[in-house]
Amino acid sequence: MPPVPDPRTLADWFKRPFPNKRMSYPGYPPTGYPPFPGYPPAGQESSFPPPGQYPYPSGFPPMGGGAYPAVPSGGFPGAGGYTPGGYPAPGGYPGAPQPGGAPSYPGVPPGQGFGAPPAGAGFSGYPQPPPQSYGGGPPQVPLSGGFPGGQMPSQYPGGQAPYSSQPAAMTQGTQGTVRPAANFDAMRDAEILRKAMKGFGTDEQAIVDVVASRSNDQRQKIKAAFKTMYGKDLIKDLKSELSGNMEELVLALFMPTTYYDAWSLRNAMKGAGTQERVLIEILCTRTNQEIQEIVRCYQSEFGRDLEKDIRSDTSGHFERLLVSMCQGNRDENQNVNHQLAQEDAQRLYQAGEGRLGTDESCFNMILATRSFPQLKATMEAYSRMANRDLLSSVGREFSGNVENGLKAILQCALNRPAFFAERLYYSMKGAGTDDSTLVRIVVTRSEIDLVQIKQIFTQMYQKTLSTMIASDTSGDYRKLLLAIVGQ
């Protein structure tokens, strides 16, 4: 025991050097961690059009049942040419790549699960996607309408559209089932809808025919044309003519994309209880631009701060994860740094499996800041190093909502369409149907990647999405869902 120092030199005594502890983990860098390259990403500052007001009545039908779906637009590149393979496949979801190579997705025949490193587990059999461009990447397809990415609708209620009515970016490798209709005439469609609701009874089939075959941007123009022609609000007329799940689906389709996400978040936290899976589905899967627009829309339309609402409705490490997500500041660089992936894998191992207890902040930091392609490379490095996949480690180290949130991020990094296919399946599996989840995923993915979701759904569950929808729904609600999803 050292002698008690003179009080005059107490400060100097506390400053004395201590020996550095060296980690015993293999490959652990003794010199410390490198800085985070490219974070926060430069040029991510988003500008928004002036906030406006949407003509949606406050008494919108509540969405029941907290679900757990959604994804940003598109997939992601194949980790800069990195091709994992050569490992024995332990089995898993059908349709995943064969050992030693990448899948010929879409349209992959059923096969073994994702390969695993020697003497270890793979990625829990989660299906692997093809090389794709992930949101924020260079290969983008311009959109006809919506902001940004095209012209603002000229017939938007109250003038210009303050938020985009379509996904911020459609990227190569994914495809929606709903596309803008050719020879579109908003006034003609408004007249068809007026006749369908005029007089005794409602012609639901006419509504289905129009709504299912128009893009979200075109529906906004129909809504504006309807008010111009008849001096009536289309949404109020639809609410008075429809009911139940059909009403919820139709009104969701007429909401601008950003507003629908913001409304879903508000509804998930309004009143008693919180639908945590809705928060996870939206905040953990959207692009930076989409999240920033959602935050702005949430403030302008509901007069509330999204981050404050999250803090008041959640707690602990789950609260911190969602607050990180709603910053919309994830690195979206397409390039993968394999050295950083190895170092992050070591950090995650040290923060979880390699210690007693869990350093939750380390998981939050890496999963909230790294790009999705970078996270995919980190998962591959983790499997090689730890002989256990990162998804299963998260399941061992965490529980509850924070486990679900972290897994959602990792699953989207592996295969975004598979993430949504799984949510759709469990919304209909067993007794009853979680219609709010079914509606939300079908509507939000219909113009982004629903084609790929359908394909991977068939590979994962040996039945088509349309077959499962047809057996779990009925009436005009089923007709409209199937018209959007397609066969």
Image (cartoon, rainbow, N blue to C red):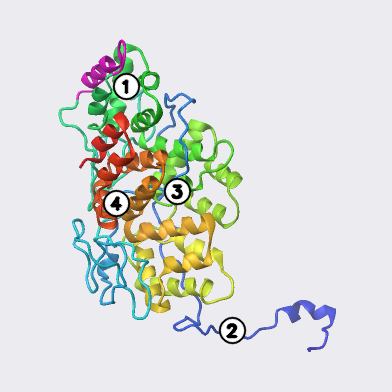
Asked if marks 4 and 2 touch (Cβ < 8 Å), the reply is: no
Label 4 Cα crowd, 10 Å radius (few <14 / some 14-19 / many 20+): many
Q: Amino acid at mark 3?
A: Leu
The residue depicted at 31 percent of the width and 11 percent of the height is 200
Q: Distance of mark 3 from mark 1, alpha carbons?
A: 30 Å
Residue 52 vs 198, above or below: the answer is below
Label 3 Cα crowd, 10 Å radius (few <14 / some 14-19 / many 20+): many
Residue 357 location, quadrant: bottom right
Looking at this rendering, what residue extends furthest in the front direction?
431
Q: Quadrant of the C terminus?
A: top left
Q: Distance of mark 4 from mark 1, alpha carbons?
A: 30 Å
Q: Amino acid at mark 1?
A: Ala
Q: Earlier in the sequence, mark 2 or mark 3?
A: 2
Residue 468 vs 156, above or below: the answer is below
Q: Label 2: which residue?
A: 21
Q: Earlier in the sequence, mark 3 or mark 1?
A: 1
Whether residue 294 appears in magenta in the rendering, the answer is no
Disc 2 versus disc 3: nearer the observer: 3
- Numbered range of the magenta stretch: 185-202
Along the horizontal axis of the image, is 14 left or right of 147?
right
Q: Label 4: which residue?
A: 74
Query: Most prominent secondary structure in the magenta stretch?
Result: helix
Q: Amino acid at mark 4?
A: Gly
Say what secondary structure mark 3 lies in.
helix
Say what secondary structure mark 1 lies in.
helix
Q: Label 1: which residue?
A: 224
Where residue 20 sits in the image (x, y, percent)? 60, 84
Along the horizontal axis of the image, is 238 left or right of 295?
left
